[in-house]
Image (spheres, grey):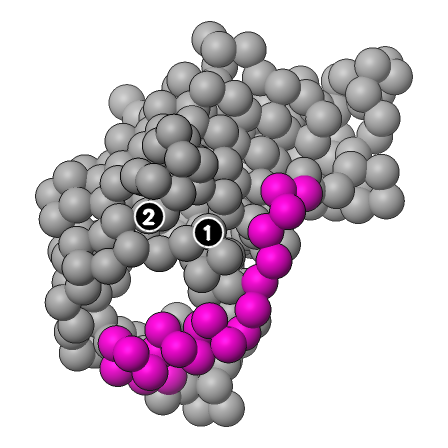
Amino acid sequence: MIKKIFVFLLVFLLLIVGALSYIGVVPFISPLIAKAKDLGVKTDRELVTKFDEKYGMKNELPGGVVADGSEPKYEGSVDLDISLSGEEISSILEYWKEQYGMTPIYDVQVRINSDGTGEVSGILDVSTAVLMAKKLGYSNADIEKAKSYAKYVAGDLPFYIKGRGGVTNNEVSVNASEIQIGRVTLPESIAGPVAEASGDMVERRMKEVPGVNIERLSLENGKVNLKGTIPNTVK
């Protein structure tokens, strides 16, 4: 059911953005006029280096990057019980995008607020997202239907999400209070199912990585608190 909701919403959102752009309500989406919302979070490669050294993370990829047409392989494990700032998470995401070109989001900023809410902004690489959807088990027919609406979008899609979320025993929960696609703020009737479908995609991706076991992930006091086990080596 969640899969069908996701495909419907992907088609619906692309159609909404394209239609609004066409009639002039929203400027036609392009990187020149619709950039990711600036959350004031700065990335720092040194934060990634310190994290890797502290927890024994190893990048054994040839040349340090995943070759085109290949998928990373994960080995080993490390137990974590840690708190991470938005700057650390944003920096790790930036680093991984450079290593793995098939990451479907970029220019990501993550901000964790003192009230337990989180904010994420960035750019969705539409073509890569479609490929990932196929890899995660969505049917060719559903993907082709969604792709047929992508012609209404000139380039990739800026996004912004605010809300609460977490993980308990590998089950993801997302409760979004605001979602923006480009410059369009989605009504609550659409934002809820979008958040639910997003959680489904995260769970699917987690299951693909051997050795991942997230006992608890929560947003508290301006930090992401994580307890679980993850691989410590990528090849």
For label 2, the crowd category at 10 Å Cα-Cα, with few meaning under 14, some 14 to 19 and many 20 or more, is many
2 and 1 marks in contact (CB < 8 Å)? yes
* Secondary structure of residue under mark 2: strand
- Residue 74: x and y, percent? 26, 74
Question: Which disc number belongs to residue 86?
Answer: 1
Report the side of 53 relative to 63 (left or right).
Answer: left
- The three-letter amino acid code for the residue at tag 1 is Gly
The C terminus is located in which quarter?
bottom left
- Residue 75: x and y, percent? 21, 78
In the displayed structure, 98 sits above or below 162; it is below
Residue at image position (41%, 17%) is 192
Q: Please say whether residue 53 is visible from this viewpoint.
A: yes
Residue at image position (17%, 45%) is 216
Residues shaded magenta: 38-59
Q: Would you name the residue on which mark 2 appears?
A: 224
> Label 2, label 1: how many angstroms apart (C-alpha)?
8 Å
- The three-letter amino acid code for the residue at tag 2 is Val
* Secondary structure of residue under mark 1: helix
Q: Counting residues from the N terminus, which is met first, the one under dot 2 or under dot 1? A: 1
Q: Nearer the viewer, residue 73 or 93?
A: 93
